[in-house]
Amino acid sequence: MSIIVFCEHHEEGFKKYTLEAITYGRKLAESTNQPLVGIVNHSSFDKEALKRYGLSTVYSFSGIPNGDSRQTALNIASIYKEAGGNIIILPFNSSGKNIAGQLGAFGEAGVVTSVTGMPTQLSPLRVPSTVFAGKATAEIEIEGEKAVLAIQTNAIAAEESPVDEWEHHAIEAIKESEVEVVSKDTIKGEIPLPEAEKVVSGGRGLKGPENWQILLDLAEVLGAATACSRPVSDSDWRPHHEHVGQTGISIQPNLYIAIGISGAIQHLGGVNNSKTIVVINKDPEAPFFKAADYGVVGDLFEVVPKLTEAIRKFNASQ
């Protein structure tokens, strides 16, 4: 039996959430005394990155575009069986959401998504997970030995654990993909929201796109990604790829600063898995304060520039 980690390959290499999944898999393999095996969906990849994070045995397949979830799941499940896997670890990103259920069906395994931490029990396997759009946490117990675990971004910190050995098995894809990628648009020059550890987000309280610079200044001194509520993106104040919430991108940063956002339930559903939430709003009755770890009641046009300047001075003193 072995622990399998799906290492999704991108043009720019392995992303942060993949390194976190490898770390999760390695820690689980160590605690259960099982071998760790990686699966990469590309024939050419950075093997040194995988070795640096503890993978010494890797299977790979190619010819299946990232958008073909069915063929990706079929190939992973085939290697899973060949490698004697019992637990599959994968990131709970857009790809993970698409293939987790299929992997469970093809591999005859129990599935837990939105996993937030290491298992609280190994036999039978029990893991923490968020439920009800992040409003609650549950411990899910899996009957049987086979499981698929989709790990939330930032649920565990990526940790290096270099290995010297290397074993690579290139496997021919089961079936050619029927999906053709016609074009691909990628946002460049920004911290991708699903990977961001810090996010500064704005709402209608900023009153207009002309005032957004104060939010951008705060994000810059924090090294944070920027986001917005749905009304902001619907009004074309900010690009739609910055919209976070139930109807936008769901995120789990270590720090989420909500500026001028009232905290509608649809917005909270996409951000309340953040480890620390800070709310800045002049309305003391804003619903967001109930979900906040820290709250500032005040005029954001006064509070945010002062906060930015204080952080800038702190950074300069370090």
Image (spheres, rainbow, N blue to C red):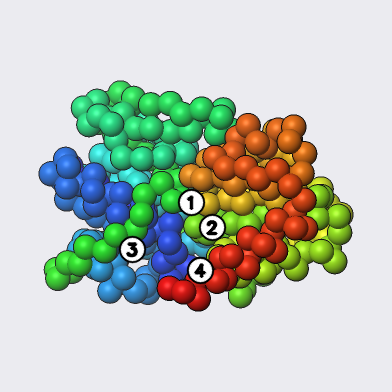
Q: Which residue is mark 4?
A: 314
Q: Foreground: 209 or 62? A: 209
Crowd band around label 3 with a 10 angstrom C-alpha radius: few (<14), some (14–19), many (20+): many
Q: Nearer the viewer, mark 3 or mark 2?
A: 2
Instruction: Answer yes or no: is residue 95 visible.
Output: no
Residue ID for mark 1: 254
Label 2 neighbourhood size at 10 Å, few (<14), some (14-19), many (20+)?
Answer: many
User: Which of the two labelled residues, at mark 1 and mark 2, occupies the earlier sequence position?
Assistant: 2
Q: Quadrant of the N terminus?
A: top left
Of the numbered discs 3 and 1, the one sitting upstream in the chain is 3
Estimate the spatial distance between the alpha carbons at disc 1 and disc 2, rounded to whole Å: 6 Å
The residue lying at 47 percent from left, 39 percent from top is: 114
Up-down relation of residue 58 to residue 151 (above or below): below
C-alpha separation, residue under disc 3 versus residue under disc 2: 33 Å
* C-alpha distance separating marks 2 and 4: 17 Å
Q: Nearer the viewer, residue 241 or 205?
A: 205
Residue linked to disc 2: 198
How many angstroms separate mark 3 from mark 4 (CA)?
46 Å
Q: Amino acid at mark 4?
A: Phe
